[in-house]
Image: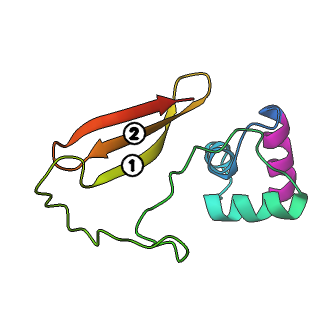
C-alpha cells in the first residue's frame, strides 16, 4: 500500500518530489510515513528526485600532503612584499559559477592582484 502511494505521489509531482515531500504528502493523505521510510521505499522502487541538490561547500582544515604549509599560521610580517598568500573561491552569479583568485600582501593586508573567470 505504501509503495503504491510513493509511486503515485512521485508521479503526481512529475518526478520532482524527494523523500521529505513524499512523506509530507503521504501524511496529509492519512498514511503514517516518515522521510526515512519514504527514502527507503523510493530507493527500493528506483525513484529519484529530478531536483538539483543544493551546493555544499567543502570544509577546510585538511592539509594537503604534497603542498607544504610554510607559514604555519605565523602571519606577523615586518616588511611589505615578504609574504604573499592567495586563495581561490567560487561565487554563484545567479546563472553560473565564477572563480575568484586573490593574492594578498600579508604586511599591508591588501590585495596585490586578483583574477576572475
Percent across and percent down for residue 77 are 15, 58
- Verify whether residue 2 appears in magenta: yes
Q: Quadrant of residue 55?
A: top right
Predominant secondary structure in magenta? helix
Which residue is painted at 25% across and 68% down in the image? Answer: 73
Which residue is painted at 18% across and 47% down in the image? Answer: 80
**Label 1 close to label 2 by CB (< 8 Å):** yes
Please indicate whether residue 107 sits to the left or right of residue 51 in the image: left
Q: In terms of sequence position, does the residue under pointer 1 or pointer 2 come before the other?
A: 1
Count of labels in the image: 2
Q: Is residue 1 visible?
A: no
Residue at the extreme bottom: 65
Q: Nearer the viewer, residue 92 or 10?
A: 92
* Residue that label 2 marks: 102
Element type at mark 1 = strand
Would you place residue 59 above or below residue 93 in this image?
below
Please indicate whether residue 36 sits to the left or right of residue 68 in the image: right
Q: Which residues are magenta?
A: 1-11
Amino acid at each position: 500500500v505504501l509503495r503504491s502511494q510513493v509511486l503515485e505521489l512521485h508521479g503526481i509531482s512529475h518526478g520532482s518530489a524527494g523523500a521529505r515531500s513524499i512523506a509530507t504528502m503521504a501524511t496529509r493523505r492519512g498514511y503514517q510515513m516518515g522521510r526515512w521510510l519514504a527514502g527507503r521505499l523510493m530507493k527500493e522502487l528506483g525513484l529519484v528526485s529530478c531536483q538539483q541538490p543544493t551546493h555544499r561547500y567543502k570544509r577546510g582544515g585538511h592539509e594537503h600532503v604534497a603542498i607544504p604549509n610554510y607559514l604555519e599560521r605565523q602571519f606577523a610580517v615586518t616588511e611589505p612584499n615578504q609574504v604573499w598568500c592567495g586563495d581561490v573561491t567560487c561565487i554563484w552569479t545567479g546563472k553560473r559559477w565564477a572563480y575568484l583568485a586573490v593574492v594578498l600582501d600579508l604586511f599591508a593586508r591588501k590585495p596585490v592582484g586578483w583574477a576572475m573567470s
